[in-house]
Amino acid sequence: MRIHLHRYLVPFHRHLSTRISDDYNYFKRSILSTDHFQQSLPRLPIPQLDKTCQRYLAAVKPILNNDENAYKETQKIVADFRAGDGKRLDAQLRVKNASNRQTSYISKPWFEMYLKSRLPLILNFNFFLVFTDDQQQLKPAARLTNYLISSIRFMNTLRANVLDPEVYHLNPKKTNTDRFRKYLRFVPKPMAFYGAVVQKAFPLDMSQYSRLFNSTRVPKPDCDVLETHNDNARHIIVIKRGHYYKVNVLDEKRELLPAEKLAAIMKYLTEDLREEENAYPLGYFTADKRDRWATVRTQLEELSEHNKQIFTEIDSSIMVICLDEDDPAKLAKSLSKQQLAEYVSGKYLCYNASNRWFDKSFNMIMLSDGTLGLHCEHSWGDGVALLRFCNDIDKDANEHNRINSTNYLSIQSSTNDCIQKLEFHFNDQIKKEFEISKQNYHEFVSKFNVNIFQEPLLGKNLLKKLALSPDAIMQLAIQMAYYKLHHRFVGTYESCSTAVYKHGRTETIRPVTSETKNFIEALTKSTDEKLKKDLLKKCSEKHQQLIKEAATGQGFDRHLFVLKYLQEIENQEPLHRLYKDKSYQLMNYNILSTSTVASKHIAAGGFGPVVNDGYGIGYLIDDEQCGLLVTSYLHRELPSFMQAADESFRELAAIIKS
């Protein structure tokens, strides 16, 4: 009897080849489909109008700084709103929401808030995240190759619907397990969310993830548009010295090029490509006011079909990589460690516009010393999606390490016939417009300042042991710092995700409360340490209540915002005087705009101030230390604020540890 081994070996080899390809092109396939929970996510609730009004009045009172007449007037205005326009608009909103069940009541107005703004994206909206240092100390091109591969693997896994769904685990040891996922696999999709919640695991909305790749914000007169191109693109865009390079990273079967081939391309681009600076990089236009950029872009497209095609290549690209050439390691000889950190933060937030495309969903920026991070456009999504992407690719790149310090040495720099330079056509008018936008940019960012505070004074371990909210303590220190300088309480914004709901975005936590006001005033009026500790405890408890309300869609900001949108935009009615009242203006003039990032994969994150005399404060607190990254246009005042912040943290630490 003859055994035809080839009948068995050929299918086996095909299966093995497919498996190897899958292992390279995809993350480990999730037990659950990516969209397993999406259908069953609850809808973002609309708070009761009475509750919204009560919460608004409670938040307004401390920032009126004991102006009782102003508070009484606001109470009258709110009562009139609640009985009249507010009641009518709230009823209109509920009818509208009931007839549009596939989304959230905040989604459309919130998108329009971003897209209709005519302000420059940088400093006003966009934000940045920087990965932790490379512990392997790879060459920049080697590290970049690994993160590029991991980014494409993330994209492929997401699009194949086998990326692990995003879930917030209250008890990760119990629920962040394969056993738990196998149990949920048998829960029907219309009930899957509730099957997870029973076990204290909260699935999050993932609708924003589709705009991570092949997406851009396109400038248009009056209102920009978000464009996400089909997934047929095989290329990324690399920007170096203001020049644009189309780089194919997928083959004709839409599979990743081999790691060694990608490393050879990245090595060529980072180490061997030498060109003079582009005289007319369009990055300056992407940093300018949106109507101006919309006009110039239209002029460029009308100038030639060639220009129109280049825009399509950039807009449809999987992602943009920016290669910066000034070496922080060389600058370190003349700068302190803190000055260097501040310089790097500025690079990721707003500097070097000639080497950016600020409209793209994100720019992955590599500095010459291997520092790597993202500059992120904000209209399409919030921190949850970007943070998940960063966490996953950082973990994947470091675990798999396909290009390492050993095999990189044998890789020869090469274009591999995968690189195409893209050059726009210009006329004299466009060149004149370029000089104007370049000047606008330099004038704008020349006002920008950044400072960093990081000390092992307080950490999560100590605060949780004492049943104090780490977030409450960070917010309290920020308020204390401002009060030390100005002796008043001001509008303060803390972002809170509502991604536990379908198409949820964010809600605002208003950290300035009567409790924080009482505590801060007691610091200068009382020597009773027990009183201070009791007041501190009340601050923490109140802040935890506000976090819970915001995360469950029970804040007041978004509700009032949408009622204003209905009256002003959709109904085209005169605004109720609540929205013109001094109290509402103070509340929404956010001198302290704050947000936090909690991830072991992220070294820093930040954003610009939202008002000219304010601060943009990114903060983090880990197990043993706390830190602030503060941006401002107040060149003279910023050092004083940082000194006040240092004093505030030390003062709090002394009270807490006593």
Image (cartoon, helix red, strand yellow):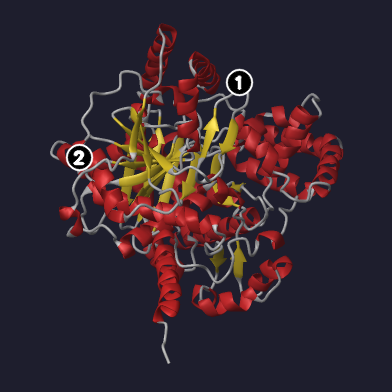
Question: Percent x, y for residue 589?
Answer: 57, 32
Q: Give the residue number, with chain letter if any, for mark 1.
A: 221
Q: Give the residue number, with chain letter if any, for mark 2.
A: 271
For badge 2, the amino acid type reads: Glu
Query: Residue 324: which quarter of the image?
Result: top left
Say which of marks 2 and 1 sits in front: 2
Q: Residue furthest top?
A: 428
Position of residue 523 relative to residue 643, above or below, is below
Q: From the viewer's perspective, is 578 left or right of 59? A: right
Query: Residue 196: which quarter of the image?
Result: bottom right
* SS of the residue under disc 2: helix
Position of residue 67 relative to residue 10, above or below, is above
Measuring 36% from the left and 52% from the top, which residue is drawn there? 257
Measuring 67% from the left and 46% from the top, which residue is drawn there? 58
- Which of the two discs, 2 and 1, labels the residue nearer the N terminus? 1
Residue 522 visible in the shown view? no
Separation (CA) of disc 2 from disc 1: 40 Å
Of residue 236 and residue 205, the one placed in the foreground of this image is: 236
Q: Quadrant of the N terminus?
A: bottom left
For badge 1, the amino acid type reads: Pro
* SS of the residue under disc 1: loop
